[in-house]
Image: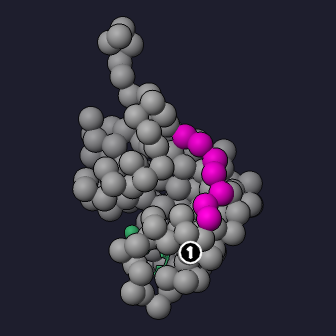
Amino acid sequence: MEQTLTIIKPDGVARGLTGRILEALENEGMKIVGTKMVQLTKRGAEGFYQVHRHQPFFDSLTTYMSSGPVVLAVLEGEGIIERLRQLMGATDPQKAAPGTLRHRYGLSIQENVIHGSDSLDTARWEIAYFFSQMEIHSRPLNSG
Ligand code: UDP
Ligand code: MG
């Protein structure tokens, strides 16, 4: 079954939006199969966002992402990667469609409240960056 990684970013956790955002995901039928709160180091954030290492916003992004705790979650379901991206909305909250999480809660193009993997390969890599197999609970009941 398809899985994706979501992160409630430091601005979301700090503003007390964790419950509301997880509820919005579950209300859309997205199944949470793993979750934890962590505070990234600057190095950890740089590793996670290494595809953006040549972008002008890289230093600011990784400083922000390591500025406070984040809530990580692995979501599972058919088409979950694209469904999460739709629910998140555009990177810039000002351009995000009404009803999307970034439109509702995003503060700026950087502090945009939530992350979601953008492809199957990225999702696999991002999940493995943070979660061991034992921390993901996607087995159906009675499967041993
Ligand atoms: N970002 C930023 N400035 C930009 C573009 C992106 O600070 O001009 C940040 C923002 O937090 C974004 C993250 O970098 O979510 C990763 O950028 P990406 O283009 O992958 O956007 P996403 O996939 O998160 O929509
Ligand atoms: Mg991205």
Q: Is residue 7 visible?
A: yes
Check the image and report above or below for 112 versus 129. below
Residue lying farthest to the bottom in this orientation: 56
Query: Which residue bears the numbered disc 1?
Result: 62
User: Residue 40 colored magenta?
Assistant: yes
Q: Where's residue 129, x and y in %?
A: 43, 53
- Residue at the outermost front position: 43
Task: Return the x and y of residue 80 as percentages of the image width and height.
Answer: 33, 46
> Considering the image in quadrants, where does the C terminus appear?
top left
**Which segment did they paint magenta?**
35-41
Name the residue located 69 percent from the left edge and 69 percent from the top edge: 67
Q: Is residue 67 above or below residue 29?
A: below
Is residue 106 something one can see in this rendering? Answer: no
Crowding at dot 1, Cα within 10 Å, few <14 / some 14-19 / many 20+, comes out as many
Tell me, what colour scheme is on the image? one colour
Is 43 on the left-hand or right-hand side of 17?
left
Asked if residue 122 lies left or right of residue 48, the reply is left
Rendered image quadrant of residue 138: top left
Task: Locate residue 16: give its quadrant.
Answer: bottom right
The answer to which of 28 and 3 lies nearer the viewer is: 3
Q: Residue placed at 36% from the left, 22% from the top?
A: 139
Rendering coords of residue 47 (x, y %): 46, 67
Picture coordinates of residue 6, whole percent (x, y) = 47, 53
Along the line of sight, the residue nearer the viewer: 125 or 90: 125
Q: Amino acid at mark 1?
A: Thr
Q: Considering depth in this image, is 89 or 68 the residue closer to the camera?
A: 68
Using the image as rendered, state which of residue 141 and residue 50 is in the foreground: 50
Horizontally, residue 45 falls left or right of residue 12, namely left
Residue 3 as seen in the image, left or right of residue 97: left
Q: Is residue 61 above or below residue 17?
A: below
